[in-house]
Image: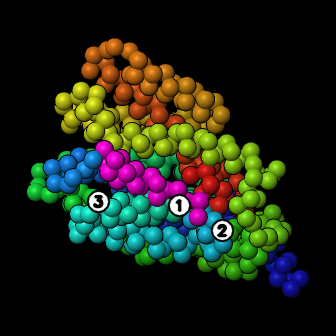
Amino acid sequence: MKYIKKELQSKKDYKKAPFSDVHWRVYISILLGQIACGYALGISGIALDQAGSYLPLTNFWTGLIGAGGLIGLFGSIFMGRLADKVGRKGLLMLNMYIFTILSLAHLFVTNLFLIFLLRLGLGLMMAIDYTVGNALLIEWLPTGESGKKQSRLLIYWSIGFILAYLIGSYLGGFSQGWKYSFASSFIFGLIAAVFRSFAKIPASPSWLASRGKNAKAQKVIQRNLGSKWGLSERLLSIKVKNISWLHLFSKKYRRQTLVGGLFYASQAFSFFGISIFLPILLKSMGVTNANMSGILYNGSMLIGVIIGILIFNKISRRSFLVVSFLSSAVALAAMVFLDISMWAKLGIFSLFSVILSSSLVLDYPYPSELFDVKVRATGMGICI
């Protein structure tokens, strides 16, 4: 036993290993999931707008179905907890296959409640990618690379969202195109699922160590990085404990939990809410050219993400959050309270999109940075 412990301690910290094949496999696995998630959320509002001619949609059902994916995201509370108990790999190998099946099921459903349940299920699968995927990513990527790579994930989420607008606009020309629009997210879900299967994403060494499985963690590291790499002294000395949700509200973690939860709820849900109901929102603003305004909004969103990535490590997380929240609030207030033309509203709306989406680059790295490996997925689940 002493020999094994000494052998483990003689290895270099695997988090200091250079970026290699295993890091790319994990990163691409997660970014493909982000494209699928961005597409699934983006297509929702477009498909609902198309379904108005075929389904008895009231304001209640429009809101409920449109928000189904967001409601499903609340499942991250349970998915994060589950990932801290059973590990990251298994959940990420399964969720995109279920995502694909749920997407295809839209082709065979016209009942409004069943459509809502499908959107809810998709939201739950997305919750796994947001919480478990980011936990695995930060636990594999080299120190100094995780925050940078996580902030760039939003580019791929935005690509999925913009593709939803382009593909959804085309599918709207078909009879009952709303079904095909809803179901089309299966393409990106299947791509992510198949890649994860063939890439053979590894288990998290950090999570294995947190469960007292140091020898198994070492085997995973050596299989993917080589024999000279291993667990850090900190991970080797972790004591195995049963962690409950209440632990996140203990003196040690409650500040991180409150900061992460309030930040994510205030920012991400306002963005997702506006983005999902964009076609309906633009109509209420009196915007008649939906295609042009949609392109303007999506283009502004992508510009905002790129700006956010450029300044991500230039200023503190706190300053980034405060400035973006205040600027977004001012732009939103101007749209609501000022008596201005449609074009002026579109201009301010685009500015609002740039500001809000630029700060979204914090959504992935910031919550994961707040918690250590023992409670990371559970903590991210509570926040998200």
Percent position of residue 61, x then y:
32, 51
Residue depicted at x 47% and y 39%:
270
Q: Secondary structure at mark 2?
A: helix
Residue depicted at x 37% and y 41%:
275
Q: Classify residue 114 by image quadrant.
A: bottom left
**Quarter containing the N terminus:** bottom right
Extent of the magenta region:
59-78
Q: Residues within 10 Å of mark 3 (few under 14, many from 20)?
A: some
Can you see residue 28? no
Decide: marks 3, 1 in contact (CB < 8 A)? Answer: no
Q: Amino acid at mark 1?
A: Gly
Q: Earlier in the sequence, mark 3 or mark 1?
A: 1
Residue depicted at x 89% and y 83%:
2
Name the residue that disc number 3 marks: 112
Of residues 18 and 242, the one nearer the viewer is 242
Q: Earlier in the sequence, mark 1 or mark 2?
A: 1
Of residues 320 and 342, the one nearer the viewer is 342
Q: Which mark is residue 84?
A: 2
Mark 3 or mark 1, which is nearer to you?
3
Percent position of residue 30, x then y:
48, 61
Mark 2 or mark 3, which is nearer to you?
3
- Residue 178 as seen in the image, left or right of residue 244: left
Q: Main secondary structure of the magenta part?
A: helix
Name the residue that disc number 1 marks: 75
Q: CA distance from mark 2 to mark 3?
A: 35 Å
Can you see residue 259? yes
Decide: marks 2, 3 in contact (CB < 8 A)? Answer: no
Q: Amino acid at mark 3?
A: Leu
Q: Residues within 10 Å of mark 1 (few under 14, many from 20)?
A: many
Mark 1 or mark 2, which is nearer to you?
1
